Amino acid sequence: MNKIKSDRSTVGFMVVAVLFIAVVQVLLSLGILNAFWDTLLRFGAVMAIVSLGLNLIYGFNGQFSLGQWGFYAIGAYAAADITYRWTQMQSASGLVVLFLIVSLVGLSFWGVAKLLARMRGIDPLSGFALYLVGVIVAGFIAVKLGQFLIEPVTALFSAIPAAFALQLIFFLAVILGGLIAAEVSYIFGWPVLTLGSDYFGIATLGFTIIVKVLLDNSDTLLGFTEMKGARGMIGIPNITSWLWVSIFLLITVIVTRNLLHSSNGRAIVSVREDEIASKAMGIDVAQQKILTFVLGSFFAGIAGALYAHINGFLHPNTFNFIKSFDPMIIIVFGGLGSVTGTVFAAFAWALVLEGFLRLWLPQGFETWRFVVYPVLLLIMMLLRPKGLFGGFEVPFLKQLIPPLHRPSKSNGEASEVKS
């Protein structure tokens, strides 16, 4: 019976999701929804992706993080640099070097993890130092090796029809933006996740500030002259369409749902409820924390990469620590631990606060946003602490309790016990 209900809810969810995406696309194609609402819808989907990542970290795993915006920025600038170099410089250098960095750094993480598994009792800072050495070595090799591959790869993509090549490079840039954000979160989270929740929040806030300062000086300190530092990066192609962003949002929802319904998902939620009890049950708490933090940061990097190609312009002030509270506000409004609430609140946040109120209220209202947000948040905490949706989920996202199995007395095979 549970299997039948699961199949029906899955088919129903996919049908409704595809119809919604198709209807919006038709309205945009016919001009019924103009460019203003098109941008807001795409921005709402981007905010839903980055907020789902934060809800996974905070709502489901219980780790109070203010670093989501920093990983959002990393994904945005990394992907933008790839597409900028292709469209403005006719070079695949950004794609080649970042691909090699992501690949070799991931390989170094695997090697260091194997080494640490044999070195019992090593402290987090020493482990972090080993990971850092691995990253530096892998990055150096990637840059040197990339010099030999840039021209062949550029020639390969140039042989493809230009429109298709641009879309392909954009897709790869989005994925690589998410992966580089995930790898940065892994090495950052290795020592920081040992801190308590409040101290972890302060550390992640500091990370966001550091990323913003680095972006302010990206042209001088980091050597990326095309990013233009505090002046803002221009010339980024506007590739993020409603179809692209809605597909990535749908995949994010499905991945989150499947993770939470798995044994790892149950372990993630158990860490939020009680770390000591989780350890007593044999759950590797540190592993579940780092898994959640990395996956949530990967979603943030994906969202940032999509955002970078909406307006074609990036400025470090977009990623300051004040803006880092936006996804936190969204998941609190929607409901901590609610995927449905997070998606709904993200679109409502974009369409209402950035759309309807800008049209209906007097000009100059934008300057009051940082007053309106806290007031609304305070009212929500007083009237409905669990958020608009609380623990509600649509049928496809509901937790399905698997049947209990126990050894059979006759032949030792598992037999299902129906309640």
Image (cartoon, rainbow, N blue to C red):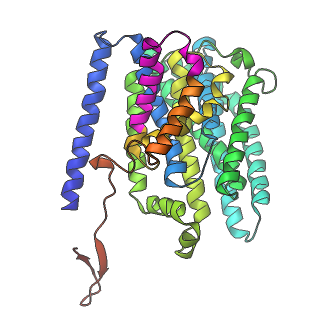
**Of residues 253 and 358, the one drawn nearer to the viewer in this rendering:** 358
Residue 256 spot, x, y in % from top left: 43, 47
Residue 362 spot, x, y in % from top left: 49, 10
**Of residues 36 and 18, the one drawn nearer to the viewer in this rendering:** 36
At 33% from the left and 13% from the top, the residue drawn is: 33
**Of residues 124 and 160, the one drawn nearer to the viewer in this rendering:** 124
Q: Quadrant of residue 95?
A: top right
At 54% from the left and 66% from the top, the residue drawn is: 274
Task: Reply yes or no: does residue 63 show up in magenta.
Answer: no
Specify the quadrant that holds the C terminus: bottom left
Q: Quick check: 107 left or right of 166?
A: right
Residue 365 spot, x, y in % from top left: 54, 15
Whether 371 is drawn above or below 235: the answer is below
Whether 96 is drawn above or below 363: the answer is below
At 40% from the left and 16% from the top, the residue drawn is: 37
Q: Quadrant of residue 218?
A: top right
Residue 85 spot, x, y in % from top left: 62, 18
Q: Name, please, the residue furthest toward the bottom.
A: 410
Magenta-colored span: 343-368
**Of residues 359 and 344, the one drawn nearer to the viewer in this rendering:** 359
Q: Is residue 291 visible?
A: yes
At 53% from the left and 43% from the top, the residue drawn is: 54
Specify the quadrant that holds the N terminus: bottom left
Q: Quadrant of residue 413?
A: bottom left
